[in-house]
Amino acid sequence: MLSNGVIISFTFGYLVLLFAIAWFSEKSEKSGRRLSTNPYVYSLSLAVYCTAWTYYGSVGRAATNGLEFLTIYIGPSLIAPLWWIVMRKIIRICKVQQLSSIADFISSRYGKNVTLGGIVTIFSLLGILPYTALQIKAVASSFDIMSVSEVGYELLSAPFYKDSAFYLALGLALFTVLFGTRHIEATARHEGMVMAIAFESIFKLLAFLVVGVFVSFFVFDGFGDIFAQASAKGLEDLFVLQGENNASEWFWMSVLSMMAVLFLPRQFQMGVIENNNEKHLDTAMWLFPLYLLLINIFVLPIALGGLVYFPTGTVDADTFVLALPIAFDQEWMALLVYLGGFSAATGMIIVSTIALSTMVSNNLVMPLLLVNDGFQKRYQHRLGSILIWTRRVTIFGIILLAYIYYKQIAGQFSLVSIGLISFVAIAQFTPAIIGGIFWKKGARLGALSGILAGFVLWFYTLVVPTMITAGYLSPSIMTDGLFGLGFLKPYSLLGLDEMSYVTHGLFYSLSVNLILYLVVSLFSQQSSKEHNQAVIFVDIFKYSSALDSSIVWKGQAFLPDLKSLLDNFLGNEKTEMALDEYRQISGKTLTSGIYADPELVSYSERLLSGIIGSASARIMVASVVKEEEISMEEVIGILRETQELKSLNEKLNLKTRELKKASDKLQKMNEALRMNDMLKDEFISTVTHEMKTPLTSIRAFSEILLDEDIEDADRKRFLEIIIQETQRMTRLIDQVLDLERFDSGRQKMNFEKTDPKICILQSADSMMQVFREKNIDFSIHLNFETQELMIDEDRIKQVVLNLLSNAAKFAASKIRLVGFESPMGLMVQVCDDGKGIKEEELPYIFEKFYQANNQTSKKPIGSGLGLAISKKIIEYHGGELSVKRLEGMTCFEFTLPFQSEKIKLNQEKNNHD
Amino acid sequence: MIKILIVDDEPNILLSLEFLFKKEGYHVFIARDGEEALDIIAENLPELIILDIMMPNVDGYEVAKHLREKHKGIKIIFLTAKSKQQDIQKGLDLGADLYLVKPFSTKELVAKVKTLLN
């Protein structure tokens, strides 16, 4: 057996490890490495749901009630997909409204009401106290089992100063104070704590899996063996689902745990307050149920294993997890299991007490202090430290109270039965919260009466019986009912005794709660402030970004007053920073001595809200604001204005984007126009240049001819040249005009049914003389059926001629003309064996005067307009003109489509261009 | 006999200039492009050259550049359709003695050539 010293060293060593994890992660947070802003860390931190109850209690429950323990995990798994709707909304509301706890949430929703916040706080305290006691009990008894080889029950009677549980509780309280109350803003995230809790979640899962594997596969021969041996002992009931009665039990338990996983103070703290990115829910929605599945796999095997191995009644089933390794002399495994259980318990205690201490300070102590003017004046400048100390004292207080509760009452009950009582308490907040975020009519009085009635019933049906068992109240209440009235028996109100006591308590408290909430809400009038909050909560996704302008303060405050109020809580430096931020957001300048506008008042209220809770913040702000009564109409008006402003803003944004698009388009068009202009300039300068050439010859020869002193033969020759050159000029002018008509779409075509074969042959024929002169080997292959096409005969001849004469200029020795049918229509190719066109020039050769484009060396292509015109002609026919290299030859090819419709269409299109 | 080289890719212009200057008593060489011109220069250095600018292969600018590097004394006349101010400037910057724009006056050209060669 391990000595007490070893166990205690490991226990405190574990706490030191937690401390180190928390400390280092806060340090790395400051240096910019944000470990805790990881969706997996967030999801794991939610597993704070699994406490000592899960760790030890599930096995205990399974050993008596069989599979029913699963309901506590089925509920949360079933509701996880709904988190996207419910949790995300609550998270958004808390971030926007700077809410710090579930009490703050409810109080804020129902008009920042002090009473409601206080009541929720007190009930949470009452509800969680047994739960915390449960954790202490689990730690204490596991420590006891570890340190004494025989399972002893002397624990409860030992005086506290000899009780190790007492010192563990103190240690935990110290740890929690150190890590939970470092910031004054309750809405500030506790990065270190989140990391520590995530670590604990992994640790307890591993420890539980280790013992599960040990029991299933080392003590027994796998699951089959365990179930077989259990059956032999007549334990089938525990792993076989039973009849109808069970169904309602399962249903109610699942519903109960659904509510618990959302609204338990520690779940709210981890899931909502510590959340810094709504998207993390995506991961949590699958990882959390998976975690629950893993930690539950071995529950039944361990429970059955314990029941089979230990003689009936000798070992408390709640301690099987630990007792089994000890019984098999696995000391170190037992130590691991013990530490796993310790981590499950500490996780719950740390987070719960932090959450509760925030509630107590912000929703109980602060409002009480602030309501009293005398107090407020006296402590005004120390409110910040009062706040922190309230939280510290509360943490110690809760843990000590839980210790006392454990000593006096909880010690006598099973872990799960205590936990379920807490669950039912927390479930009482459900109508007020869910109603609050989905139903605008949900009113303060409804919430208040529902919660109060729910708690009275909870106390009577669930807490009173435990007090009776512990000997504080007369047992006659159980048997005869309160005041001897039979229908008031705590476990069977109005004679309803078919349910288990937990389901019974839940059924009555929640039904009455819900009915009162609905009915009273329907019949009560909301105040304007309350309505304002109701609208914001229900429609949070509409308001969250524009909330800054939803002003609920109509009055004005003296700026120095407001500033000194902020100073008290934030300190001078942070106040200045906050005001600076406001200046930046609002774009307003704040000159001291003037009045703060409602917007700044609201901003300050939200700032304070994060520190002292919404209700307290309202009281504080009210003390410096000379408020005029604001009417319901005004509130609705303000809200509508906000909405309109927002949609106006959106419209404006849209308009801006449209304008941007339009101006982009304009710019592109402008660019195109400038390009066009440039091309036009170039075209004109090229045309004039081309005209100067024949003109120069004409002038030169004319001047020469002016001299009489010329031989007749020369004179005749020169006159012929002059005529040639004037013809050249005429041709050029014709072509320019031609092209201009094509460009502007005014070119008329003469489409007639024509045989293209004849047309091509005639063009070729007129070139024969040139080919012969140049010694060119010309071949012609027309491989298509004669078929009349709708073409402009003269124009097509012009194209073929142009291509052939171009080829003649470049060909080395060979020219080939080919015609054949292709999918695109009739295809005509003119190929020459010249040196070809450079790759980089290909895109330009169909442009007018491409040869003259910014270059000084001229290419011998004649006017430079031929190809451009040919391309236009072919396009007017619905075909295409292109160029490519083919078998070492340069081939210009054009198509003429067979369908005449296309031609017409294209002609129309071109005419409209 | 004074040698003149005329460079142009337009046959009719070559023909007219050749006729003109032969009549004036010069020894006239002709070239159809820059390349030919450079060949002739290498064999038979003329006293004066009349240069078109836009020609296939080697253009007039390059011929002028070559002449100014190797044979400083040769007179250069650009005779071209390029009439923009910057073209004229470029031609003169390359060291041309004269820049004439087409269409030109034959009398003027002959007179200028005479002045340059005296």
Image: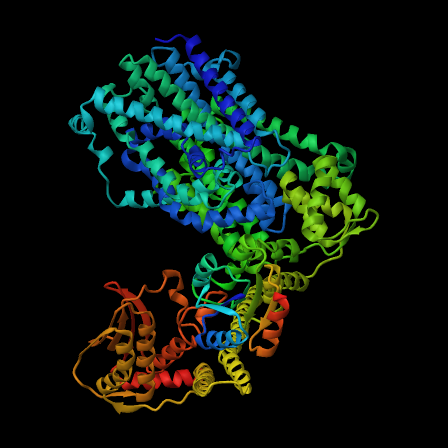
Give residue B101's position: percent from left, percent from top: 58, 73
Q: Residue at x 40, y 19 (%)?
A: A141
Q: Residue at x 49, y 51 (%)?
A: A434
Q: Quadrant of the N terminus of chain A?
A: top left
Q: Is residue A4 above or below residue A56?
A: above
Q: Is residue B54 above or below residue A875?
A: above
Q: Is residue A179 above or below residue A847?
A: above
Give residue A818's position: percent from left, percent from top: 22, 75
In this view, the residue farthest toward the right is A593
Q: Nearer the viewer, residue B73 or A759?
A: B73
Q: Quadrant of the C terminus of chain A?
A: bottom left
In this view, the residue farthest toward the front is B1
In the visual, does A756 lie left or right of A402?
Answer: left
Q: Is residue A306 visible?
A: no
Q: Is residue A57 above or below residue A566?
A: above
Q: How is the image coloured?
A: rainbow
Count the marks: 0
Give residue B118's position: percent from left, percent from top: 63, 66
Residue A280: name its quadrant: top left
Q: Nearer the viewer, residue A32 or A558?
A: A32
Q: Nearer the viewer, residue A744 or A510?
A: A744
Q: Is residue A638 visible?
A: yes
Q: Residue at x 72, y 46 (%)?
A: A621
Q: Residue at x 18, y 23 (%)?
A: A221
